[in-house]
């Protein structure tokens, strides 16, 4: 139930297909990407784990009374909206990193980081040199441990933009977190 079982007849290869993931699972997305890389044909993953694009908008409202309610100025006549800032936050950077690795090995992966990933199977992959991204879950765990024990911690290598959620929450709780280099935090 809710599982994908894939097998090929003896001496045959897997065949590409279209898969809709009920939940955008990192593990399912990555497993299907790896299998599809060597499958015959094209595989399409729908509702794949992805990077999330967050759009912050600035709302400008005009009214006769110009009353301020919360963050917005209310209006009875007209509303003007203009985009102020677009910020990309990587929700699941491991999926894009795996796609980069597979591509470096000769795979043909397109759309990683979006909800639709397309993989055209190849007959074989080749070796490559590749540096994987630092583990953000492990880094976040150490950061929380340092917070709980009121300890100072220096971490490198890390990718600070992959840790924005943890940094924001720990900062809000009173922790001081400083980026001391391109790939280091303290």
Image (tube, helix red, strand yellow):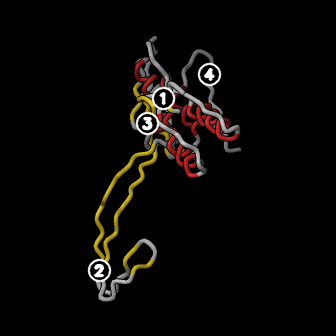
Which residue in the protein does label 1 denote? Answer: 184
Pinpoint residue 48: horizontal percent, then vertical percent. 51, 42
Sequence-wise, the earlier of marks 3 and 2 is: 2
Sequence-wise, the earlier of marks 4 and 1 is: 4
Which residue in the protein does label 4 denote? Answer: 9
Where the N terminus falls, by quadrant? Answer: top right
Sequence-wise, the earlier of marks 2 and 1 is: 2
> 68 above or below 27?
below
Circle 2 or circle 1, nearest the eye: 1
Give the Cα separation between the discs numbered 4 and 3.
Answer: 29 Å
Crowd around label 4: few <14 · some 14–19 · many ≥20 (10 Å) = few
Nearer to the camera, 73 or 120:
73
Sequence-wise, the earlier of marks 1 and 3 is: 3
- Residue at 44%, 13% (x, y): give it: 129
Which residue in the protein does label 2 denote? Answer: 62
Circle 2 or circle 4, nearest the eye: 2
Nearer to the camera, 8 or 71:
71
Circle 4 or circle 1, nearest the eye: 1
Q: Is residue 43 visible?
A: no
Crowd around label 1: few <14 · some 14–19 · many ≥20 (10 Å) = some
Nearer to the camera, 124 or 159:
159
Give the Cα separation between the discs numbered 4 and 1.
Answer: 49 Å
- On residue 121, the disc is none
Q: Quadrant of residue 153?
A: top right
Crowd around label 2: few <14 · some 14–19 · many ≥20 (10 Å) = some
């Amino acid at each position: 139930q809710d599982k994908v079982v894939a097998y090929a007849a003896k001496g045959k290869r897997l065949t590409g297909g279209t898969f809709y993931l009920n939940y955008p699972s990192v593990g399912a997305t990555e497993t299907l990407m790896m299998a599809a890389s060597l499958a015959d044909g094209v595989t399409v993953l729908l509702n794949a784990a992805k990077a999330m694009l967050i759009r912050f908008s600035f709302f400008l409202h005009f009214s006769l009374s110009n009353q301020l309610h919360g963050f917005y100025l209310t209006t009875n006549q007209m509303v003007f909206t203009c985009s102020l800032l677009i910020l990309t936050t990587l929700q699941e950077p491991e999926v894009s990193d795996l796609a980069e690795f597979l591509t470096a090995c000769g795979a043909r992966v397109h759309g990683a980081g979006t909800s639709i990933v397309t993989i055209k199977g190849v007959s074989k992959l080749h070796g490559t040199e590749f540096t994987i991204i630092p583990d953000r879950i492990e880094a976040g765990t150490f950061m929380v441990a340092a917070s709980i024990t009121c300890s100072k911690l220096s971490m490198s290598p890390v990718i600070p933009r992959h840790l924005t959620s943890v940094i924001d929450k720990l900062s809000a709780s009173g922790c001081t977190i400083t980026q001391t280099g391109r790939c280091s935090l303290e």
